């Protein structure tokens, strides 16, 4: 059940998403959307995994939200459609590896696409988004790079869909729980 504070978190997330809609700069848009996403996946993690420590690894929380959105048909269709273009962009940047995995995320993305494994695609895309966020927040993105701007716009458009689906599904789950 959503508390008053939980509803405030979702409202603030929507405000950050709205702020992103008015950003002309791809870096600012991505950061605003990431703040909204961070709020939503943090709330989801708190609700779905109440026994996990709030200090738990943030990357785990960012990926775990896939359980909420994996059945979204609009997200599934979008991800399947954009995967080849996304994989191509990843040749240029440092979004290659997840933690200690020896297979690049790009290879995971391509393998999942070939196998038509949407679950693996979604997992890999959420990891890529988190890795791109890390590289941006830790200063490894060039501000004046056209390819970087293109990648961040691409990721921002994906985050909009993920956020919309996450918030809608989160609220729908809560309405069902009340009934």
Image (cartoon, rainbow, N blue to C red):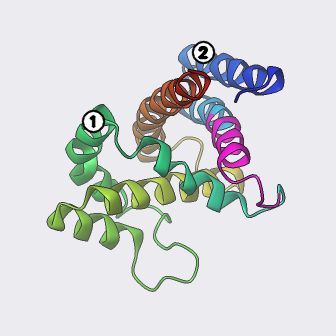
Question: Does 84 lie within the magenta span?
Answer: no
Separation of residues labelled 1 and 2 (CA atoms)? 23 Å
- Find numbered disc 1 in the image and state the secondary structure of the residue it sits on: helix
What residue is at 34 percent from the left and 63 percent from the top?
A: 120
Mark 1 or 2 closer to N-term? 2
What residue is at 31 percent from the left and 72 percent from the top?
A: 107
What residue is at 61 percent from the left and 23 percent from the top?
A: 178
Residue designated by label 1? 73
Residue designated by label 2? 18
Q: Residue 89 location, x and y as percent?
A: 34, 54
Task: Determine whether 80 is above or below 113 in the image.
Answer: above
Question: Does 47 lie within the magenta span?
Answer: yes
Task: Determine whether 55 is above or below 8 in the image.
Answer: below
Quadrant location of the N terminus? top right
Characterize the local packing of mark 1: few (<14), some (14-19) or many (20 or more) Cα atoms within 10 angstroms. Answer: few
The quarter of the displayed image where residue 106 is located = bottom left
Q: Which range is magenta?
A: 37-53
Q: Residue 41 location, x and y as percent?
A: 64, 43
Residue 74 seen in this snapshot: yes
Closer to the camera, 106 or 127? 127
Q: Residue 156 location, x and y as percent?
A: 48, 34
Characterize the local packing of mark 2: few (<14), some (14-19) or many (20 or more) Cα atoms within 10 angstroms. Answer: some
Residue 140 seen in this snapshot: no
Q: Is the magenta stretch mostly helix, strand or loop?
A: helix
Q: Residue 27 location, x and y as percent?
A: 59, 36
Task: Determine whether 19 is above or below 156 in the image.
Answer: above
The quarter of the displayed image where residue 112 is located = bottom left
Q: Are marks 1 and 2 in contact (CB under 8 Å)?
A: no
Closer to the camera, 25 or 21? 21
């Amino acid at each position: 059940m959503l508390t008053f504070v939980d509803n405030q978190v979702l409202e603030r997330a929507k405000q950050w998403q709205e702020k992103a809609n008015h950003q002309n700069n791809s870096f600012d848009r991505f950061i605003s959307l990431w703040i909204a996403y961070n709020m939503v996946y943090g709330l989801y993690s708190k609700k779905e995994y109440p026994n996990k420590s709030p200090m738990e690894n943030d990357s785990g929380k960012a990926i775990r939200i896939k359980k909420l959105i994996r059945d979204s048909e609009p997200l599934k269709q979008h991800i399947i459609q954009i995967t080849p273009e996304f994989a191509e962009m990843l040749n240029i940047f440092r979004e290659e590896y997840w933690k200690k995995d020896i297979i690049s995320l790009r290879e995971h993305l391509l393998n999942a696409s070939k196998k038509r494994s949407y679950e693996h695609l979604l997992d890999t895309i959420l990891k890529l988004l988190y890795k791109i966020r890390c590289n941006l927040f830790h200063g490894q993105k060039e501000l004046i790079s056209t390819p970087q701007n293109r990648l961040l716009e691409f990721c921002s458009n994906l985050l909009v869909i993920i956020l919309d689906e996450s918030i809608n599904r989160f609220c729908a789950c809560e309405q069902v729980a009340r009934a």
